[in-house]
Amino acid sequence: MLEPLARIGRDPATGGYVRDAWSEADMELREWFAGEAARRGLDLREDRNGNLWAWWGDPAARPGVVTGSHLDSVRQGGAYDGPLGVVSAFAALDRLKNRGVTPARPVGVVCFTDEEGARFGVPCMGSRLLTGAIKPDRALALTDDDGDTLADVMARAGRKPYAIGRDDETLATVGTFVELHVEQGRALVDQERPVGVASAIWPHGRWRIDFRGRADHAGTTRLADRDDPMLPFARMVLAARAGAERRGVVATVGKVHVSPGNANAIPGRVSAWLDARGADERDVRQLVAELAEGMDVKEESWTPVVDFDAALRDRLARVAGGDTPAPILPTGAGHDAGIMAAAGVPAGMLFVRNPTGVSHSPDEHAEQADCEAGVVALAHVLEDLCR
Ligand code: HGY
Ligand code: MN
Ligand code: MN
Ligand code: MN
C-alpha cells in the first residue's frame, strides 16, 4: 500500500515528499484514502475540519476503536512519517478480517488533516480543530507563504471554511485512539526491538521572531551606517543553541524568510521560526523568554506535555510486545494522538523501529519486516481493545 502512495508529492530531484495540506498532492492522498476505504467496503466520512474517517461498523451505535495517522508531510519529508500509520491501520483491519475476527465495537481508520503544519505553521490542525484546541477564527486567518489564508485554500478545495471547529458529534465516535508511527529517534534500535509504545510527548512550541532593519545597497553602505537585521537574527540562532545546551532541551531554527531577498542588498527584514521542546516545560519556557527579551516574538503554537494514560499504555505494551512487553518510550515529536489525549480521549501510540532514527528527511526509513511487526502488533491491539 505504501507503493502507490510513494509517487504522490514526491520530488524526483531529492526523493523527498512535499505534501502540504489542501495542495494538489493532498487531494490525491485523500483520493487514495477514499479508494482504500471503498475497496474494503468501509463507510467513508469527511468531518467539518477535513479529517477523513473510514468505519467498519457504525460508531453511532457505540463509540469505536480508531487507529490511523496523517498523510501530509513536512517539506522534503520521508515516506513513513504519517503514511505508515494510515497504511498499517488498513493492513491491520485486513488482518482481522482475514482471521475471521468480527469486532464487538466499530473500528475506524482516520487520516487527520495537516498534522505537520508545513503550510500554515500550526501543527496538528485537524485534531486541534476537532477537539477545540484552536479557535476557528485564528485558524482561518493563518496565511501560507503566498499570503493565502486557510479559509482561501479550503474554499478553493470545495470545503466550507466557516463550518470548521470543535466537533462533538465526531469526537463522540472515538472511544479509543491508537496511532502507529515510525519512530523518529533510535531508542528501538538501541533496545533491539521492532515495536515500542509511547509514554509521553514532550511539551513543545513554535514561535515567529521578526527582525526589522533597513534595506540598503550592499556595496555603497558603510558598515557603520547599516541597520542589518541579519545580525540580531544570527545572534538569536547562536543564543538558542547555547541556551538549549545549558538547559538540556532542544531548539531549532529551520525556517527563515529574508526579504526582500537580494544578494546585493542588506535585508530589510528577517522572519525566523523557532521550534523549542524539552522534557520539562519550565526549561523550554525559560529558554524562549530569555531569547525573546527585547524582540518581536509571537507564539504560533504551544502544546503542553502529554502523559498517555498509564493503564492503556501498559495494556498496549503487553499486547503489542508478544512474549516480553514492548519498550515504553517518551518522544520529542508531536502527534495527533497527543492532541486527542489532551482532550480526554483515551489514546496511545505504537512506534516502529527506524534503523537510522532520521526523520523529517528523505532518509527516514523502516524495514519491511518491522512494518509487518507493527501491523501484527496493531491488529492484536485493536482486537484486544474491541473486546
Ligand atoms: O513534531 C512535529 O514537528 C509535528 O507535530 N509532527
Ligand atoms: Mn512529522
Ligand atoms: Mn507524524
Ligand atoms: Mn544597481
Image (cartoon, rainbow, N blue to C red):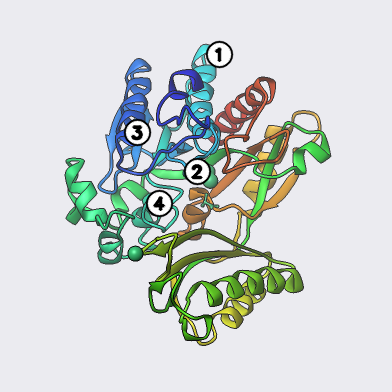
Q: Nearer the viewer's eye, disc 3 or disc 1?
A: 3
- The answer to whether any part of residue 149 appears in the image is yes
Dot 3: element: helix
Marks 4 and 1 sit apart, C-alpha to C-alpha, by: 32 Å
Number of residues whose C-alpha sits closer than 10 Å to that of mark 4, classed few (under 14), some (14–19) or many (20 or more): many
- Provide residue 9's location: percent of width, then percent of height: 40, 31
The residue nearer to you, when weighing 286 against 98, is: 286
Q: Nearer the viewer's eye, disc 4 or disc 2?
A: 4
Q: Amino acid at mark 1?
A: Arg
**Mark 2 residue's CB less than 8 Å from ligand 3:** no
Q: Nearer the viewer's eye, disc 3 or disc 4?
A: 3
Q: Residue at x 55, y 66 (%)?
A: 304
Question: Label 3 belongs to which residue?
Answer: 25
Q: Nearer the viewer's eye, disc 4 or disc 1?
A: 4
Q: Nearer the viewer's eye, disc 2 or disc 1?
A: 2
- Provide residue 381's location: percent of width, then percent of height: 60, 33
Q: Amino acid at mark 4?
A: Ser
Q: Earlier in the sequence, mark 2 or mark 1?
A: 1
Question: Label 2 belongs to which residue?
Answer: 177
Number of residues whose C-alpha sits closer than 10 Å to that of mark 2, classed few (under 14), some (14–19) or many (20 or more): many
Question: Label 1 belongs to which residue?
Answer: 99
Marks 3 and 4 sit apart, C-alpha to C-alpha, by: 20 Å
Q: Amino acid at mark 3?
A: Ala
- Provide residue 257's location: percent of width, then percent of height: 43, 61
Q: Earlier in the sequence, mark 3 or mark 4?
A: 3
Marks 4 and 2 sit apart, C-alpha to C-alpha, by: 12 Å
Marks 2 and 1 sit apart, C-alpha to C-alpha, by: 22 Å
Question: Label 4 belongs to which residue?
Answer: 127
The residue nearer to you, when weighing 238 against 53, is: 238
Asked if residue 128 is positioned above or below residue 370 in the image, the reply reads below
Q: Residue at x 34, y 33 (%)?
A: 25
Dot 2: element: strand
